């Protein structure tokens, strides 16, 4: 096992910078997930850790030792790729043993390590098969087994479940988590799927455009997102965002008006704004909105159901407020509602989040509420 530290790590391709000064500490035995949209730099960052990409600037340390100039083969890490990268003409056993044979490991040790990994991954009965005779999940387990036999200090996973169907992804997600608990080895896992990140990680690193937006435990990011991007990326369905304005500043926080079909409602919410008239975005998660009469201090909105999805144990209502703002509501169980129905929904201010509005959001909000004369 090993610890890892990145200090001001930068990656450039010519004049283009794709990783902007990343600082990160990964503790020994920790399961860390890099998550973010496509093109955010998470796979590039993983490849830099593995040694497959050079570090343009900054330091990369393994157990306190700088390894910027150490080759990938000498770092003692093992990488599991999205594409499995198995040799089609070799059996499962041969695929798992190949790396050990290349470094002249004694045959008795190779056999012991392959058999142990096969037992751990439930591949004992498949060792004589070729990759084409395996399911996607079995192929991925072989790829993981090939990494296990090398006894790496850190496992690196680059979107390993992307090629699997939904059921297999859930199964393999559980298996990789259980594997980490058994091996107690440091693991770094790249995914664009925030559900994978939330269910597997000890610590999540949220990336956007080559920069770290926030680092923290899954529930820390869910309960206290540092900005609107993290709030919208972590959680499924994604958080609702409503235009709001500060109407009063007090010792307990700020009171804000939220535009809705009932005009404006005032609720006390703690936030960073300090001036009356300040435009903000209020965030509320779909699961925190309820179809009931609210208590004092809760916000009431009237919405029209555009689409209803009933999944049995959970129902999703996709609604629109009077000003055109979209609102997703998640409720437990089954409900007697239909598309076109007008409903009243409530949520407590304690569940709300406040974020600064972007320039684009401010312009759109002004356009929504402009009079015909002011629009020219």
Image (spheres, helix red, strand yellow):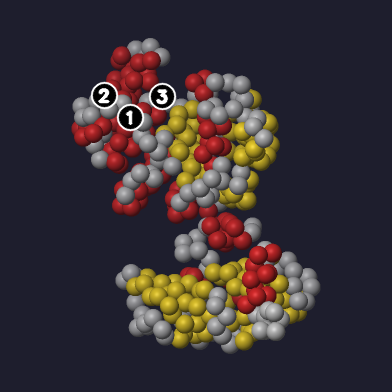
Frontmost of labels 3 and 2 is: 2
Q: Is disc 2 placed on a helix, strand or loop?
A: loop
Residue 31 makes an appearance in the image: no
| Rendered view: 21 above or below 90 | below
Name the residue beneath numbered marker 3. Answer: 150
Q: Quick one: label 1 or label 3, which is nearer the N terminus?
A: 1
| Rendered view: 109 above or below 205 | above
Mark 3 neighbour class, 10 Å CA radius: few under 14, some 14 to 19, many 20 or more: some
Q: Is disc 1 placed on a helix, strand or loop?
A: loop
Name the residue beneath numbered marker 1. Answer: 86
Residue pictured at 51% horizontal, 47% vertical: 38
> Could you tell whether 250 is left or right of 266 in the image?
right
Separation of disc 2 and disc 1 at Cα? 8 Å
Rendered image: mark on residue 90: 2
Residue pictured at 25% horizontal, 40% vertical: 135
Separation of disc 1 and disc 3 at Cα? 16 Å
Q: Are marks 2 and 1 in contact (CB under 8 Å)?
A: yes
Residue 247, x across and y down, in percent? 74, 80
Quadrant of the rendered image containing residue 67: top right
Residue 12, x across and y down, in percent? 64, 34
| Rendered view: 350 above or below 89 | below
Residue 23, x across and y down, in percent? 66, 40
Rendered image: mark on residue 155: none
Quadrant of the rendered image containing residue 312: bottom left
Mark 1 neighbour class, 10 Å CA radius: few under 14, some 14 to 19, many 20 or more: many
Q: Quick one: label 3 or label 2, which is nearer the N terminus?
A: 2
Separation of disc 3 and disc 2 at Cα? 18 Å
Q: Is disc 3 placed on a helix, strand or loop?
A: loop
């Amino acid at each position: 096992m090993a610890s890892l530290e990145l200090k001001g790590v930068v990656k450039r391709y010519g004049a283009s910078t794709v990783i902007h000064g990343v600082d990160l500490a990964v503790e020994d035995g920790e399961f860390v997930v890099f998550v973010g949209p496509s093109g955010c730099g998470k796979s590039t960052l993983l490849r830099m850790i593995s040694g497959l990409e050079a570090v343009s600037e900054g330091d990369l340390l393994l157990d306190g030792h700088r390894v910027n100039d150490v080759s990938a083969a000498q770092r003692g890490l093992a990488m599991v790729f999205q594409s499995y990268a198995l040799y089609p003409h070799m059996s499962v056993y041969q695929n798992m043993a190949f790396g050990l044979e290349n470094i002249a490991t004694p045959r008795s040790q190779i056999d012991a390590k392959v058999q142990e990994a096969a037992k751990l991954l439930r591949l004992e009965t498949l060792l004589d098969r070729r990759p084409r005779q395996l399911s996607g999940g079995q192929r991925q387990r072989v790829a993981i087994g090939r990494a296990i036999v090398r006894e790496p200090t850190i496992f690196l996973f680059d979107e390993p479940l992307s090629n699997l169907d939904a059921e297999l992804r859930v199964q393999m997600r559980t298996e990789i988590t259980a594997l980490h608990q058994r091996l107690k080895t440091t693991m770094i896992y790249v995914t664009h799927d925030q559900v994978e990140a939330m269910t597997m990680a000890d610590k999540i690193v949220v990336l956007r455009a080559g920069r770290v937006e926030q680092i923290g435990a899954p529930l820390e990011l869910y309960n206290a997102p540092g900005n609107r991007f993290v709030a919208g990326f972590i959680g499924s369905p994604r958080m609702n965002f409503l235009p709001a304005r500060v109407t009063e500043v007090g010792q307990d926080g700020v009171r804000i008006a939220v535009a809705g079909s009932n005009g404006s409602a005032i609720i006390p919410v703690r936030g960073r704004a300090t001036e009356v008239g300040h435009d903000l975005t209020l965030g509320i998660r779909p699961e925190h909105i309820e179809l009931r009469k609210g208590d004092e201090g809760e916000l009431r909105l009237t919405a029209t159901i555009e689409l209803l999805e009933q999944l049995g144990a959970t129902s999703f209502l996709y609604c629109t407020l009077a000003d055109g703002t979209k609102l997703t509501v998640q409720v437990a169980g089954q409900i007697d509602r239909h598309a076109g129905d007008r409903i009243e929904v409530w949520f407590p201010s304690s569940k709300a989040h406040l974020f600064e509005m972007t320039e684009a959001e401010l312009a759109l909000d002004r356009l929504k509420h402009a009079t015909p004369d002011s629009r020219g």
